[in-house]
Image (spheres, grey):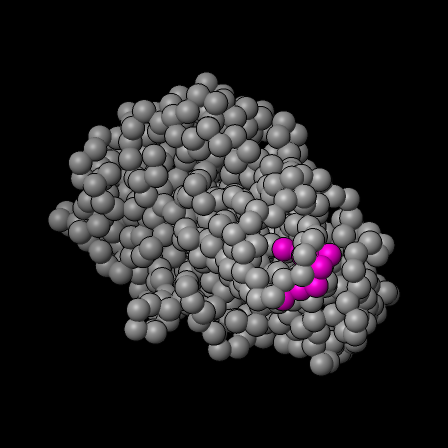
Amino acid sequence: MLRHRFIVGFLALAALSASALYAADPAPDGKIHKLTLANSNFNVDGKPLLLAAGEMHPGRIQPEFWETRIKQARAMGLNTISVYVFWNQIEAKEGEFKFEGITDIRRFVKLCQDNGMWVILRAGPYVCAETEFGGFPSWLLKDRAMKIRNNDPKFLNYCRLYVEQLAKQVADLQVNHGGPILMTQFENEYSNINPYLSAMHDLFVKAGFDGQLMICDHSGTVWNNTAGIPGVLRGYNGIRSASAARIAEAKKANGDGPVFTPEFYTGWFDLWGGKLMTVDTKQQVADTKFLFQNNVSFCFYVFNGGTNFGFSAGSNAGRPMQTTYDYDAPVDELGRTTEKFTALRAAISQELKSTPPAPPAEPKVISIPAFSLKLDAALITHLGKSVDSESVKPMEDVGQDYGFIDYRTKIAAATSKAKLHLPVARDYVWVLVNGHVVADGLTAPKTPVFDATFTAPAGATVDILVENMGRTSSPFDQANSRKGLEGNPTLDGKALTGWKIYSITAPADLAPVNGPAPAGAPAGPSLFTGTFNLAETGETYLDLSNFRFGVVWVNGHNLGRFWDIGASRSLYLPSTWQKKGENQITVLETAPAPAKPQIAASPKMVEIPFKPIEPFWVDGVGKPVETVPGQGDDGAGLQ
C-alpha cells in the first residue's frame, strides 16, 4: 500500500519533503469514513491524504478492461480514480436510463473500491471532456425555447431526473456511507457562481449526494472576484510548471481547505487536421514532483484516455475531434504502459519512499495481414425508411442523434449552372445529382452556409447528404449545435420542397436498392464490405491509409471516423469486438473509391503529416492554428 501522510508547509511556510513525514494512507474498506477539508489538507478520519489521482472515462474504455486500467493506476502510485460520467450515454433516448455495459457506473466505482482506490465522481450534467455535446443528450435540442446550461426550470427538471437516477446507482457509495467516492463534482468549468450553479448544487444535495461536493474551473475572475458556494471545494485546472502564484490563487479561493488541480494535463486532445499532441515526459515528471513538494493534490488528465468510438467524438469551437483519445497518456489507447508511465512511477516512488505494486501484464497485441474489400454499392442506393416533409428538418427534429442524414427531392425543370443555396448546413455536406457528387465540403460552425452550382436534366433527383461531425463540447454552444439542414434550401432563389429525409447511423439503417444507381463505379459515398480471419484475438490498429474519409464497422461495432487530413490514419479495434475465425467489416467511404481497397492491422498507430484546411485550421497568414495544454478549452461564461 502506498504511504504518504503529508505535513507539508504551504509556499512561504517551510516546506518539508514528502518523504519526511508520512503514515499509512487511509483507503476505502467498506466502512464509513469522515472526509474533512482543513489545515490545507484532505483529511480522512483526521489523517491527511494527498490525492494522487488519474482520470479515466468508462464510456471510452471497454468494460472488460476497466479493472486492468484501475490496477495500472495503482501500480503507477496513484490512490484515486477520477471519472467523468456521460449523461448522453446513460439517457440516449429521453426517459430511458441505462446503467449497463459502458454506463454501468456502479460496477466501475465498486471495482475502484475493490482495488483500494478512492473515487472522484465528475457527474455533470455538463462535462465537456471533448465528448459529443459536452455529455448532454442531443434530444435536449428539440425544444428551441428551452435554455440549456441555464437556470431554465424545464432544463433543470431534465437535470434533476438524470441526477436522481445517477444517485440511485452510486449515492450509497459515497465515503460517508461506506463507499470510495470522496467527492462529487457538479457542472464543469462554468466560470461563474450564479443562481444556476447554486440551483445545480441544491439539486445534487436533494438527490442524495450528501458528501463533499466540488466544482472545477480555470483561473480568472471566478477565482478572484466571486465568493464560492459554502462547503463546496473549488478545484483549479491547469496548475503545472512550478506555478507558485497559481497555487496561491487557489489557496486564497479555498481558505483553510486543500489545493486540488482536477486536470493536470498529461497531453492534449487531438483535432482533425492537426498534429497528435504531446506533453514532454521530463517536464511532466518535474511538474509532478513540484506538486508533491508543495502539498498540492492533483489528477493526471488523463491517465488512460481511450477512444471516441462510434460517433461520440465532440468538437472544440466547431473543430471536430479525432477518433483517438490517446492523449499521450501514461497508458495508451491499446492499454499499454508507456515511457511516461515508467517515469512517473519512478518519480512518485521517489517522492514517497515507497514502491507501488507491480503493474498487471501488458495486453496481447496482434497484426492482421492485408485483406481486400469489395465495393457493395453507392450509399444513396441503399437508403431505408424515410420521413416525408415539405421542408427540411435537422436531425433532432426527426429523432436522430448522430451519423448521417440524407435529404432527397426532385427538380421538375432542367437546369444549367443553377445555384443551390443551403442557409444552414452542419457539418460536412455532399450534394449529389442523379447519384453523382457535384459538390462537397465542411461548413464553418457559426456561418454554416453552403452553396453549389450544377447542371441537371428535368426530373433529376437531388440528394443532400450531411454528416454530424460532433456537436461542440467546448466552449458550450447551444445555438449552433443542431445538425443537418435548417432553413429553406433554394435553387436559383426558388424554394425546394417535397423532401424525403433518411437517417443513417449504422449499416442496419440501410435497405435494398431504392434510389437512382449511377452508371459506372460510384463517385461518391459508397459501402465496401469484406471479411478477415483471426487465429487469435488481441489489441490492434486498423490501417486506413488506402481509404480517405468515412466510418468503419467490425462485427456490427462502430470503430469511429477516419480522415486523410490526419494526423492518425488508424482506428483502434479492441479484442472484445473480435472473433476467432471470420470477422465481418463494413467501410463507408465518402470520398471516391480507393484504387486499392485493402486494410491491414498492427499494434502501431499510423500517423501522417496533418493537412490544415480552412476555415478552421488556418489563421489570416496561412499558418496552422493549434491549441496547447492549458489554453483555449475553458468552456467559460455561457449563461
Q: How far across and how far down the image is residue 105, in percent?
A: 59, 38
> For residue 274, what is the image quadrant?
bottom left
Residue appearing at x 76%, y 64% in the figure: 378
Residue appearing at x 52%, y 71% in the figure: 566
Pick the front one: 448 or 222 = 448
516 versus 131 height, above or below: below
Q: Main secondary structure of the magenta part?
A: strand
Is 250 left, or right, of 274 in this rendering?
left
> For residue 108, what is the image quadrant?
top right
Residue appearing at x 18%, y 39% in the figure: 224
Is 436 left, or right, of 141 in this rendering?
right
Outermost left residue:
12
Is 330 left, or right, of 368 in this rendering?
left
Is residue 5 in view from this perspective? no
Residue appearing at x 36%, y 62% in the figure: 627
As for residue 458 lying within the magenta part, the answer is yes
Is 580 left, or right, of 404 in this rendering?
right
Outermost front residue:
413
Q: How far across and how far down the image is residue 94, in percent?
A: 62, 30
Q: Which residues are magenta?
A: 455-464
As for residue 515 lying within the magenta part, the answer is no
Outermost top residue:
206
